[in-house]
Amino acid sequence: MAKVLIVDDDPITRAVLSKGIGNMGHETIQASNGLEAVQIASRESRIDIVLMDVVMPIMDGIEATRQIRSLEIPAVIMVLTSDDSNDTIRKAVHAGADDYLNKPVNQGQLSTRLDLALKASGFYRYRNKFASQMESLSDVSVKDGSSMERMVEKNESLLSDLLGTLNLVAKMRDNQTYEHTARVGWLSGLLAKHMGEPGDEVVAIGLAAPLHDLGKIGVPDSILLKPDKLTDREWEVMKEHTVYGWKLLNRFSSGVLKTAATIALSHHERWDGKGYPRGLKGDEIALEGRIVTVADCFDVIVTPRPYKKSRPISWGFDEIASLSGKQFCPKTVEAFLDMRQEIEPRYRANYEGKEEDTIEPERER
C-alpha cells in the first residue's frame, strides 16, 4: 500500500481522486495548494507518491515540486495538468517531476501509473540515501582538504563501491538498462585499449562508461519506458539525460567520475556535428565520448529494447562501418572493426537464436 499526497485547489477533484485511490487500496493525504503540500511533505515520515496540480493559488505546482525536491524527499511526483504544452511539461521535469497526467484524470490510467510509480518508489528511496551519502563524502573532502583521489588512496575500495552503487541505481530503475551499461563498459575499455590509450585511461574509461546513461534517472518513466516512438516534446525531454548525467557526476573530484561526467555529456554527439546536447563536431568531441558512442550504439542495435527488436550482430558491424565519418569518429570505427573477433563471441553467447529479420524504426535518433 502506498501513501499518496493529493495536491489540488479544487476540493471536488481532491475528493474524487482520494476516493478512487482509496478504492485501489492506498492511503491518501490532501493539500489545497503547493505551500501546504511542502509543509505536509516535510513533516510526514513517508510519502511514496505525490499527485501535484500545476495551477494553484499561494504556490503553484512547479514551485512546490522544486521545494519538495530540495528537501530531498524520495517521493515519485506526478503533475496533473490540463495544459500539456512543451513549456509546461519541461518546467515540471526541470523542477523534479517524474511523470504527468492530463486532467481530467482517467481512473484506469491513474491506476496503471500508480502501479508503475510504486515499482519505482524503492529506487527513489535508494537514490535519496545514496545522494545523502555522497554529500557527506563531499563535505569530508572539503573539510579535511583532501580530494576524492586522496580518499581513494586511503581506501582503495571506495571508488569501486561508489561505481557499484551507481550501477545498482541504474539496475533498480531498469534491469535491461543495467545489463546494457555493463556491456558498454566492457566494450569501451576494450576499444580504448585497442586504440593505444594509456593503462590508467583504459581503466578509467572502462569504469566510467557504464554510467553514460545515469542521467536517465531524471527522465519520467512514461517517456523512458514508452514502447512507441517518442513525440517531439518527449524527445526533447529525453535528450536532457545527457545534461542530468553531467550535473550528477561532475560535482566530484575523482578522475574516474570526471571521465564519467564527460562521457555522460558527450556520448550522443556526432562526428558530423548533428548530435546533442552541444552539437560538437569532429575532434571537438572528447575521445572518451567518441569511444562510448560507438560501443553504446552497437549494443543498442544488436539487442532488444522496449521500443525495438534486435538486429543481427553482423548487421550491427556493417551499420557502425557505414556511419564512419558521419555519426562516428573514423579512427574509433577502424579500431572497433579490428576487434570483431573479440566482440562477436560475447554477443553470440547471449543472443544466439534471438536475432530478428525485421526491425521497427529506431527510437534514439
Image (cartoon, rainbow, N blue to C red):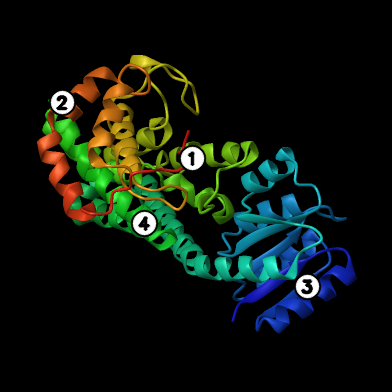
State the separation of the CA atoms marked 1 and 2: 30 Å
| Residue type (three-letter) at the residue carrying disc 3 | Leu
The residue at which mark 4 appears reads as 176
Q: Percent x, y for residue 123?
A: 46, 64
Badge number at residue 17: 3
Q: Nearer the viewer, mark 3 or mark 4?
A: 4
Q: Position of residue 1 (x, y in %)?
A: 59, 82
Nearer-N-terminus badge (2/4): 4
Q: Quadrant of residue 296?
A: top left
Label 1 CA crowd tier, 10 Å (few <14, some 14–19, many 20+): few
Alpha-carbon span between mark 3 and mark 2: 58 Å
Q: Is residue 177 left or right of residue 236?
A: left
| First of labels 1, 3 by sequence position | 3
* Mark sitting on residue 195: 2
Q: Earlier in the sequence, mark 1 or mark 4?
A: 4
Q: Which of the two marks, 2 or 4, is nearer to us in this view?
A: 4
Label 3 with label 2: CB-CB less than 8 Å: no
- The reply to whether residue 207 is in sight is no
Crowding near the residue tagged with mark 4, few <14, some 14–19, many ≥20 C-alpha atoms within 10 Å: some
Q: Which residue is mark 1?
A: 363
Q: Amino acid at mark 4?
A: Gln
Residue 241, given in percent of the width and then of the height, sits at 49, 41
User: Is label 4 in a helix, a strand or a loop?
Assistant: helix
Q: In the picture shown, does residue 277 fall above or below 125?
A: above
Which of the two marks, 1 or 2, is nearer to us in this view? 1
Q: Is residue 38 above or below residue 54?
A: below
* Image point (30%, 34%), residue name: 292
